Image (cartoon, grey):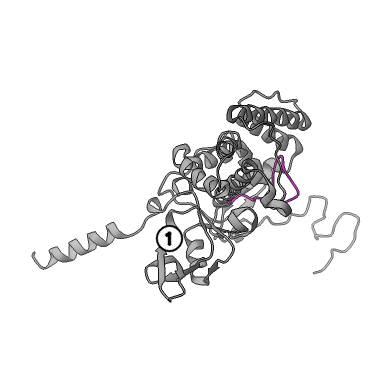
Amino acid sequence: MTSSTPRRDSAARRRIAAPTLAMLPRIADSLSFLYADIVRIVQDDTGVSAETTTEDGETTRVHIPTAALSCVLLGPGTSITQPALATFARHGTTVVCTGSGGVRCYSTTTSDALTTRWLEAQVHQWSDPERRLAVAQRMYHRRFNIAVPPDTPLNSLRGLEGQRVKALYKLLAQQHRIGRFRRSYDPAAWDQQDPVNLALSSANTCLYGITHAAIVALGCSPALGFVHQGKQHALVYDIADLYKAELTIPLAFSLHDSPQPEAMARRSFREGLRLYKLLPRIVNDIQTLLSPDDTAPLPDGHAVELVNLWDPETGSVPAGVNYAGTVVTEAEPSDTSDSSGAPEGGAEPCLP
């Protein structure tokens, strides 16, 4: 009795320690983003860490919580090893290569271990002009909380957006007493822009990175937008526009007298995300926009069939099944043939 008890306890501990699907972090529960520049990101025995080395040869190391991050922005002067990239990919963390301060987005990584459930819903809505317009109308309704008639054309929606954003700029400029404001984005003359434009561009870039991470985590294509088009980040701009009037625009105007508007915008935006719980909102909004009648997420621990076979009648059938027994055979010869098997008219049957 005493000898078997330790074995049972050991087996129980192994079962408790074994990872399950319910233990894996979800994109909606992830932290927002991490911006890094002038560091080396490496993989060691304990995980991924960011390292810097001083002129005296002293190395400072900061460990990165890969499983809890949704997006990592790599700025200039950053180097990353292949094992570290592989770790980010296994944990579903999007890696974005950006310009200085996260202003531009050059490239991103995506994981191949994704279900195509929401990608198929996106393509279904995007491929038909009427359904695509309906998604755009739902976006404007969600953005401005105004009912949009079903027959409203897209050019009217663009005019509505322009009027509301212009009115918001005017209102915030009056509240902060900064005079007339004009939105501009000029990378060629970046340092000559006013603090509000600098802060707004910096905060928007962070918002784009987080939105991009949520989109690819769901398995959607960032290139297939419903309002924007022509770039690989069209859907990113569509979804990010839903939150600018609430998050980035008021933040930028509040930094109109900041000596470092870009850095302050990133820090303040990251702190504000904890209050707004933006990632769960992005995930829920994308699912609602793409499939308003079917937005229930899969419960934790649910077994997901990663690969199915397409069927025009049933929608999908299981993969990994031998369907040889379901082959439809050719039709039997008709009654118009005589008893010898020759077709009507006396012609000889074709031999194989």
Q: What is the x, y in percent for residue 45? A: 38, 72
Q: Is residue 343 left or right of residue 48?
A: right
Residue under the image location 53 percent in, 71 percent down? 82
Residue 117 appears in the rendering: no
Q: What is the x, y in percent for residue 223? A: 69, 50
Residue 282 appears in the rendering: yes
Specify the quadrant of the image occupied by residue 73.
bottom right
Q: What is the x, y in percent for residue 19? A: 35, 58
Q: Amino acid at mark 1?
A: Ile
Residue 86, placed above or below residue 180: below
Which one is nearer the viewer's eye here, 48 or 283? 48
Q: What is the x, y in percent for residue 102? A: 59, 54
Q: Is residue 263 left or right of residue 57?
A: right
Label 1 Cα neighbours within 10 Å, binned few <14 / some 14-19 / many ≥20: some
Which one is nearer the viewer's eye here, 82 or 348? 82
Which one is nearer the viewer's eye here, 162 or 254? 254
Which one is nearer the viewer's eye here, 195 or 12? 195
Residue under the image location 41 percent in, 72 percent down? 59
Q: What secondary structure prevails in the magenta region?
A: loop
Residue under label 1: 64
Q: Quadrant of the N terminus?
A: bottom left
Give the structural element (helix, strand or loop) at label 1: loop
Within the magenta stretch, is there residue 229?
Answer: yes
Residue under the image location 57 percent in, 66 percent down? 77
Instruction: Please give the range of residues in magenta.
Output: 218-231
